[in-house]
Amino acid sequence: MSELGFKERNPNFEARVRDSFAKQTIMGLLGASLDRVELGRVTVVLPARDDLCQQDGYFHAGVTTTIADSASGYAALSLFDAQTEVLSTEFKVNLLAPAIGERLRAVATVLKPGRTLTVVEADVFADAADKTVRCARFLGTMIALRG
């Protein structure tokens, strides 16, 4: 059991999540990386770059959503067995504050694991040298794909 109370189905879950993340070309394009991988919780970080911003200099909402979605999918995948893949089936994002800082950090946690559907939430933080602001809240449903 994890500190979050989740049962481990794959003893190599961290390596599996990291290997899958490395294959996700959108994360490479954005420059995102995995910071932490725990059973039921994953953190993705993204350093600031001018080409990831909208017209006012904030991280674009699509970029913010993309890292929240990936972190959430991998939080779900960490609870799956070795033969099961993950896909997003739906999500909602609330943008809470301008995403401006030195990096974005998406922290995703499984709320309710299921045999087929897993519900995950993620908070996205804009980290700067002097402060951290929660700039988005993501709620998503991930589906377990077997075989």
Image: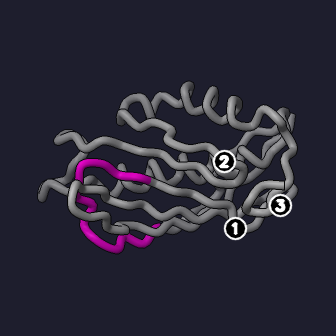
- Label 3, secondary structure: give it: loop
Give the foreground label among 3 and 2.
Answer: 2
Residue 35, disc = none
Q: Mark 3 or mark 2, which has the lower sequence index? A: 2
> Which part of the image, by quadrant, shows the N terminus?
bottom right
Residue positioned most to the left = 56
Q: Amino acid at mark 2?
A: Glu
Determine the residue positioned at 62% across, 49% down: 73
> Alpha carbon of mark 1 to alpha carbon of mark 2: how far?
14 Å
Label 3 near label 1: C-beta < 8 Å? no
Which residue is identified by label 1?
111
Q: Is residue 90 left or right of residue 59?
A: right
Reply yes or no: does residue 87 show up in magenta.
no
Measuring 83% from the left and 34% from the top, which residue is drawn there? 82
Q: Earlier in the sequence, mark 1 or mark 2?
A: 2
Classify mark 2: helix, strand or loop.
Answer: strand
Q: Left or right? Give the position of 110 relative to 131.
A: right
Q: How many marks?
A: 3
Q: Residue 1, relative to residue 49: is it above or below?
A: below
Q: Position of residue 119 (x, y in %)?
A: 69, 64
Whole-Å distance between the Cαs marked 3 and 2?
Answer: 18 Å
Decide if residue 132 is on the left or right side of residue 23. Answer: left
The residue under label 3 is which amino acid type?
Answer: Gly
Coloring basis for residues: one colour
- Residue at mark 2: 38
User: Of the numbered discs in the image, which one, if any, rests on residue 114?
Assistant: 3
Residue density around tag 3, few if under 14, some if 14–19, many if 20 or more, within 10 Å:
some
**What range of the chain is rendered magenta?**
93-105
From the viewer's perspective, is the residue at label 1 or at label 2 nearer?
2
Image spot of residue 83 (x, y percent): 84, 33
The image position of residue 100, as x and y in percent, is 22, 58
